[in-house]
Amino acid sequence: MSHTLLVVAHPRTDSLTAEVADRVHRRLRAEGSTVDLLDLYAEGFDARLTPVDEPDWENRDKTYSGEVHAHMRRMEAADDLVTVFPVWWFAPPAILKGWIDRVWNYGFAYGRSKPRLAGKRMLWLGLAGGSRDEYAEAGLDTVMDTQLRVGVSEFCGIRDARLRLLHDAELSGVPQALRADRVKEILTAADEVLDAFRPDTAARA
Amino acid sequence: MSHTLLVVAHPRTDSLTAEVADRVHRRLRAEGSTVDLLDLYAEGFDARLTPVDEPDWENRDKTYSGEVHAHMRRMEAADDLVTVFPVWWFAPPAILKGWIDRVWNYGFAYGRSKPRLAGKRMLWLGLAGGSRDEYAEAGLDTVMDTQLRVGVSEFCGIRDARLRLLHDAELSGVPQALRADRVKEILTAADEVLDAFRPDTAARA
């Protein structure tokens, strides 16, 4: 049995992001995984790194804030890290960026000869309003992959990491009569991403 | 005479980022520009977008929070937008991302047939710990340029926008005896960026 830290970053519980996260949550549990749900907004996570949580490059054993150490323990306890978020400005929302800024800290997430997060697996699952073509046209399709999968996960020794975007996920431009179908398509796409992410987990478990 | 909104995003006033920002501030004023200093940490800016500041795609005239409208007015008043920030995880700190998430909102920054920010100029000035070569090797040199210059500035009609990184800006690995020289190099590099950014401003003023 594997344990997943599911990180969600949307201000509304009735958002499509929350619906996708809930779907992921239920499917993980149905498949026998335990899930620690970290809803950053619901937990009142402050995105702003302050000096107490600033890396001290001369001390990789620095004691950070209690809040940050608690978040580190939740990461350590997980086999899999899954983030579900809306794509704002071709990037994660500030609250999710702040979770990286503060929790993925020096001496914990990186800066060790033997990376402590190595062996975990990670999925970055973003809901993007734009279409796949719009993203590709502006060269924005690879930006987040490089930044998050390479720049964060791989930088911290997580080799099995992937970014997946669910495109056309903004419903307001979709006629009311067609929205239910669009939601179904998004949820089906999310299922496919999770199915592709899970087999290895199952094999390892 | 031009007016600059100078946005700074570092938790410590004794940081190298703050020193660069102060240098930029003084040089702009010495050259006859007025400057509105927006120190996001000092002003207690909350990076978290909440529903009151969420775009309503069916209403580009939505009234956002008073705080956000005040920030919009500060942007509108400026000819030039200059941000100075440390690069964390190959991206701006969460507090700066939150300023974009919340203030660069629908109906104001984009979503108008005639972009309201068109005609302004913009400089993204980041202090990066890594070297230029390290960034290029991982393909991380172009990521921020695409994300910020293309994905934010140009997306909002700001055609004269540029991202510049000051590399090797982390002092902790530099022997104490050499730090003063390194700081001088960084400040000189910042001057050069500003000089290249300003001539057009001067010509236009």
Image (cartoon, coloured by chain):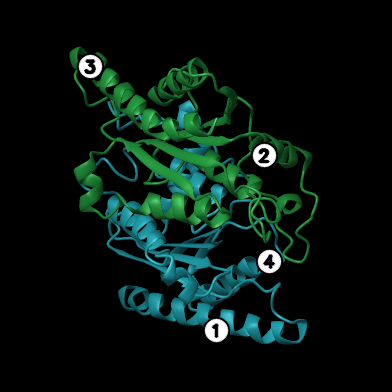
Chain colours: A green, B cyan
Q: Chain of mark 2?
A: A
Expressed as whole percent of the image width and height from the top left, the position of residue A110 reads 64, 56
Label 4 to label 2: alpha-carbon separation: 31 Å
- Name the residue tied to disc 4: B15
Residue A36 visible somewhere in the drawing: yes
Q: Give the label on residue A76, or none.
A: 2
- Could you say whether the residue bearing mark 1 is in a helix, strand or loop? helix
Expressed as whole percent of the image width and height from the top left, the position of residue B115 reads 26, 49
Q: Nearer the viewer, residue A76 or B146?
A: A76
Numbered disc in front, either 3 or 1:
3
Numbered disc in front, either 4 or 2:
2
Label 3 to label 1: alpha-carbon separation: 57 Å
- Could you say whether the residue bearing mark 2 is in a helix, strand or loop? helix
- Could you say whether the residue bearing mark 4 is in a helix, strand or loop? loop
User: Is disc 2 on the same chain as disc 1?
Assistant: no
Amino acid type at circle 1 is Thr
**Relative height, residue B180 to residue B14 (above, below):** below
- Dot 1: within a 10 Å radius of its alpha carbon, few (fewer than 14), some, or many (20 or more) residues? some
Expressed as whole percent of the image width and height from the top left, the position of residue A137 reads 20, 52
Circles 3 and 1: CB atoms closer than 8 Å: no
Amino acid type at circle 3 is Asp
Circles 1 and 2: CB atoms closer than 8 Å: no
Label 1 to label 4: alpha-carbon separation: 16 Å
Label whose residue precedes the other's in the sequence (1 or 4):
4
- Dot 2: within a 10 Å radius of its alpha carbon, few (fewer than 14), some, or many (20 or more) residues? some
- Name the residue tied to disc 3: A181
Q: Nearer the viewer, residue B42 or A94?
A: A94
Q: Chain of mark 1?
A: B
Amino acid type at circle 4 is Ser
State the residue at coordinates (47%, 70%): B165
**Relative height, residue A97 to residue A38 (above, below):** below
Q: Give the label on residue B188, or none.
A: 1
